[in-house]
Every structure is written in structure tokens, then in C-alpha cells.
Amino acid sequence: MLDAYFLRQQVHKDTPIPLYYQIKEILLGYIKNSDMGSVIPTETELCNLYGVSRPTIRQAMRELEMSGLIYRQKAKGSFVAEPKVEQEITTYFEDFEERMRRHGNTVRKEVIEFATIPADEVVARKLQLQLNDSVYKLRTVRYADDIPMVLTLSFLPAALFSTLTRADVEQNTVRQLIAREHTIKQCRKTFEVKLASDFETQLFGLKRVECLQYLETICFAGDGKPLEYTMERYRSDKSKFTITFHY
């Protein structure tokens, strides 16, 4: 039996808005107000209700599935997926771990690379260093409730820090490592969307190559020296960003 919500919706065939897009918006409204696991009407039910073709319904469903908003089970149907974990970008700094714990998630981190390397052209420019100056390279995978959520790659100028060890990285966030010796006065963040590499697709357990939410951060000391250059790749099927401005 169709949910009453769907019976109240209409599709308008005399507008320039594609039919599949109208169906998608109807489904989005249902998803936003439904619990995880709620049943999505079948293609046949939606075709009959709104008088549109099966390919139209499939296109709308496919885009919702690719966005991680619904999931399909063979011979059972389509269902509302688990809500995305909200990542907040505010005018004050907060680590991924702090955000997740505040939302009640269990967090952990896996260090997959730790090394001291010479800075290449990009890292040297971002950190205002000379080419081949020594930097710490830290690559980690961070989990929320045992789901891999973000792949992080950070570079710290070795000359500005005492000797770091892998254990330091395992037991502390980058912000905590910096705070042991410096005070961060400013951070600049850049947000983009980038296509996942084969490695990232496999790491996050994605079914296909998808776009990732890419967040680049450079943090500065009071004298303007960069203390950190970090690139974070969030899986877009499990996370969304909210930007808060304080006035």
C-alpha cells in the first residue's frame, strides 16, 4: 500500500522540468521524512501513480542510489538508506573525531603511512618551504562506527616540530600534535568535489567510481607560518557538509 505522502504529490508534464527530476524530488521529500529501511514504492507503482514510463522512474532511482540515499535488495525492493553523517564547517575549528563524538558516533583511526620526506613543489609552496625541505607525511583512515569515512593526508614542516613517531600519530589528532608546540591562529579551508581513484574506491568499499568530497586545510601560526597542510577525502555516500556562520 502506497504511503499517503505519494498520493498527495503531483507530476506536471507541461513544465520544462524533466519528469525524472520531478519524480526524484518527490522521492527526496519522502526520504527526508522517513526512517532508515522504509520501503520505497516499486517502479510499477510509481509508473501507474504518476503516469510516467519505467525508464523515467529508473533514472530517478538510479541517481538516488548513486547518492547513497536509497539501497536496493534483489527480489525485495528499494529502501531508505542510513542517514549521512553530518560534517559541520564552522567559524571555529573542530576535528573530525570531535564532530563524530558530539554526534554520538564511535571513532577510530588507522595510520597507513608515516614518514619523513623531502617536500615536493606542491607541499613546499603550500607550507612556504624550500624544495626538498623535510616534512612529516601522515596518511590515515578515520572511521565512524567502523565505517571508513575519510582518507586524510597531512604534511607538517619537520623543522617546526620535535621528533614525531608513528605512536604519536596513532594516539593524537594532527591538531593535538600541533598544539603541543604551537598555537594555531588561522585556518584556510578549500572545498571541492573530486573523482575517487581506484585506491580510494577500494578503500571505502564503493561499488563504482564515485565523486568524493575533498577538503583542503592550511593552518597558520600567529606569525603567518604554515603549520599544517592537510587533504581530506570524504566518501559522499556517507557524509554531507553543513556550513555555519556566526554573526
Image: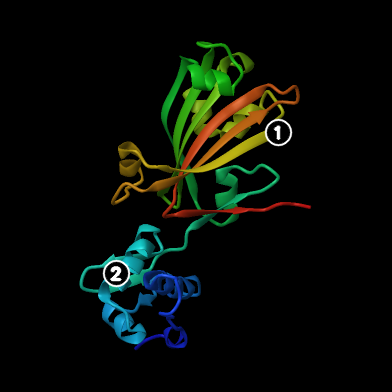
The location of residue 27, given as percent across then percent down, is: 42, 73
Vertical arrangement, residue 181 with respect to residue 79, above or below: above
The amino acid type of the residue labelled 1 equals: Gln
Q: Where does label 1 land, which residue?
A: 186
Question: For residue 35, which numbered disc appears in the image?
Answer: none
Are there few (<14), some (14-19), or many (20+) residues within 10 Å of tag 2?
A: some
Query: Label 1 to label 2, Cα distance in Å?
Result: 47 Å
Q: Is residue 54 visible?
A: yes
Vertical arrangement, residue 32 with respect to residue 156, above or below: below
Q: Are marks 1 and 2 in contact (CB under 8 Å)?
A: no
Q: Left of 185 or right of it: where is 87?
A: left
The amino acid type of the residue labelled 2 equals: Arg
Residue at (59% x, 15% y) in the render? 129
The location of residue 12, given as percent across then percent down, is: 44, 80
Vertical arrangement, residue 208 with respect to residue 46, above or below: above
Q: Quadrant of the N terminus?
A: bottom left
Vertical arrangement, residue 189 with respect to residue 239, above or below: above
The location of residue 33, given as percent across then percent down, is: 50, 74
User: Quarter-wise, where is residue 173 in the image?
Assistant: top right
Residue at (68% x, 21% y) in the render? 225
Are there few (<14), some (14-19), or many (20+) residues within 10 Å of tag 1?
A: some
Q: Secondary structure at mark 2?
A: helix
Residue at (63% x, 44% y) in the render? 94
Considering depth in this image, is 203 or 192 the residue closer to the camera?
192
Give the residue furthest to the right: 247
In front: label 1 or label 2: 2
Q: Left of 213 or right of it: where is 103?
A: right
Q: Where does label 2 land, which residue?
A: 58
User: Quarter-wise, where is residue 113 in the image?
Assistant: top left
